[in-house]
Image (cartoon, rainbow, N blue to C red):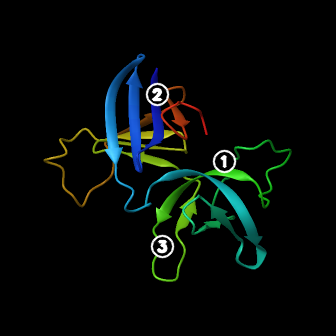
Amino acid sequence: MNKLVITNYEDHILEAVYSDGKLSDLMLFDRQSILSNIYVGKVENIVSNIDAAFVDIGTGLPCYYSIGDNKHIFLNAKKDSVLKAGDEILVQVSKDAIKTKNPVATSEIELKTENLLVNTSGRIGISGKDPKERDKRSSAPACKESIAGWIWLYLTDSLSGTAG
């Protein structure tokens, strides 16, 4: 069983991959851009005329989140699937803030490496080509298979391992 742990470490993002209970990969990322970062966001308000919500991810600038374009990943107990102010959802930043526009968040979570793409649609893409030889214009994976039961994603607040 493979596990991915994502946490904060001294104003950086630390990702650790465990394979069969042993640390197999460790990556440290700067926080200069929030693009592709994954957050537990809290819905601040719903704007029904644009079918969107604004989600607080703790950066001081709420993210625009399209309600109709996303399948919500609720992290709080819910009796229905209607998005409401105060709900906690899992989001990934798909566009950075530009001038007066807020960042954009999505519930379509993607984890990418040079040869691997994992997303919340339950699919895994693996490129069989050597990343040094691959045509940079082509990003289509060579094959796909289900990731059911393959990866666990832990989001933590600190190195203490407390799940967030």
For marks 3 and 1 on the same chain, the one whose residue lies earlier in the sequence: 1
Task: Name the residue rendered at 34%, 53% in the picture.
Answer: 30
Tell me the SS state at disc 3.
loop
> Is disc 1 surrounded by few (<14), some (14 to 19) or many (20+) residues within 10 Å?
some
Task: Identify the residue under disc 1.
Answer: 73
Q: Indicate the amino acid at tag 2.
A: Lys
Tell me the SS state at disc 1.
loop
Task: Identify the residue under disc 2.
Answer: 3
Lateral position of residue 27 relative to residue 99, left or right? left
- Circle 3/circle 1 CB separation < 8 Å: no
Dot label at residue 97: 3
- Nearer the observer: mark 3 or 1; the answer is 3
Q: Indicate the amino acid at tag 1.
A: Ile
Lateral position of residue 121 relative to residue 125, left or right? right
Quarter of the figure with the C terminus: top right
Residue lying at the far bottom of the rendered structure: 100
Viewer-proximal residue, 162 or 47? 162
For marks 1 and 2 on the same chain, the one whose residue lies earlier in the sequence: 2
Q: Position of residue 15 (x, y in %)?
A: 40, 38
Q: Position of residue 93 (x, y in %)?
A: 50, 60
Q: Position of residue 32 (x, y in %)?
A: 37, 61
> Is disc 2 surrounded by few (<14), some (14 to 19) or many (20+) residues within 10 Å?
some
Task: Name the residue rendered at 18%, 50% in the picture.
Answer: 134
Task: Name the residue rendered at 79%, 41% in the picture.
Answer: 77
